[in-house]
Image (tube, rainbow, N blue to C red):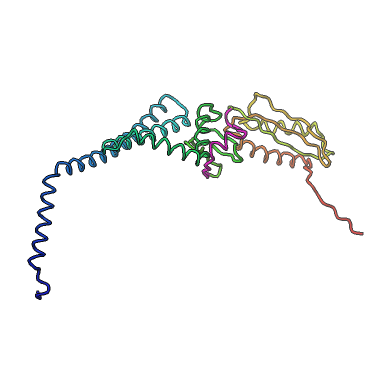
Amino acid sequence: MSPQEQPTVGSLISETSFIEQSINWFSEHHQLFISHILNIVIAIVIIIVGNNIARGLSVFLAKRLKSKAIDMTIVDFLSAITHYALIIITWIAALGHLGVETASLIAIIGAASLAIGLALKGSLSNFAAGVLLVALRPFTAGNFIEAAGTAGTVESIQLFNCILRTGDNKLIFVPNSAILKGNIVNVSRKPERRIDLIIRVSYQADLKQVRQLLEATVLANEKVLKEPSLQVAVSELASSSVNLVVRPWVKSADYWSVRFALTESIKNTLDNAEIDIPYPQLYLHKK
């Protein structure tokens, strides 16, 4: 080590003095220091335990409500509210243990919530709409609905949106307020549903024969209900065809499978009977 790099007596004295001051400060304030560290550790433990309790209690509440055969939309909504409410209480308790004035904190949170609510009034309207959807229950989990310009099976009602699953297995998150603002068509609320088919035949067809063929074809499907009874009737004398309505009733769960099957079987039946099914045609006359 060169003479320039060797520590001087003054620097050694300064470093020794700093160490002594640090030791003296710690010896004088070690109780306060340890108390703050302990409070921080306890606050962290409160947060961890509180989060686990919130998660466990919300899961327990959901299981209890399910065991009581409560609708899943209500179960999901109440468990979510319980979870977030306990999280807020946990954080307030942890901050209170650190010496934060919780009364002032709650007042600040209230004022901040008001300001945030004014800025995010759309989210608050979605929350309020969610509460009304759970209370009024125009649909439940598993129902197929048409609302807010979309359609799908209801998966669950969340705090701010409703989750729909489409037929091709896509999830659509629809704001609760958008659903509540418009018409809600609950397709599967009733156990039975009517299929409405329009069958077009030519004017040369024997309507009595056509009606008999349609009735026999539809009633041959074992999923078609006997009651309410099948209706087959002439609905319109159109420009190029005679239109008949075919209205069988089926279980709501069988609607699409029966509709597809009847459409195909009616086409085959009319073809076998050599009954013409008119379709739009364009004729060009060349002079």
Is 172 magenta? The answer is: yes
Which residue is located at x 55 percent, y 36 percent?
A: 177
Snapshot quadrant of residue 147:
top right
**Image side of residue 238 versus residue 157, left or right:** right
Report the side of 54 relative to 140 (left or right).
left
Residue pushed farthest bottom? 2
Q: Residue furthest left?
A: 9
Q: Position of residue 63 (x, y in %)?
A: 38, 30
Q: Quadrant of the C terminus?
A: bottom right
- Answer above or below: position of 217 versus 13: above
In the image, is residue 104 part of the stretch drawn in magenta?
no
**Residue 213 falls left or right of residue 135:** right
Residue under the point 50% across and 36% down: 124
* Tally of numbered discs: 0
- In the image, farthest residue toward the right: 287
| Quarter of the image with the N terminus in it | bottom left
Give the camera-side residue of 31 and 283: 31
The spot of residue 129 in percent (x, y) is 53, 33
Q: Position of residue 198 (x, y in %)?
A: 73, 37
Looking at the image, residue 3 sits to the left or right of residue 72; the answer is left
Q: Which residues are magenta?
A: 169-189
Of 267 and 239, which appears nearest the observer?
Answer: 239
Q: Where residue 176 appears, x then y in whole percent?
A: 53, 36
For the residue pair 8 and 278, the one nearer the viewer reads as: 8
Question: Residue 79 is drawn in which quadrant?
Answer: top left
* Image-quadrant location for residue 256: top right
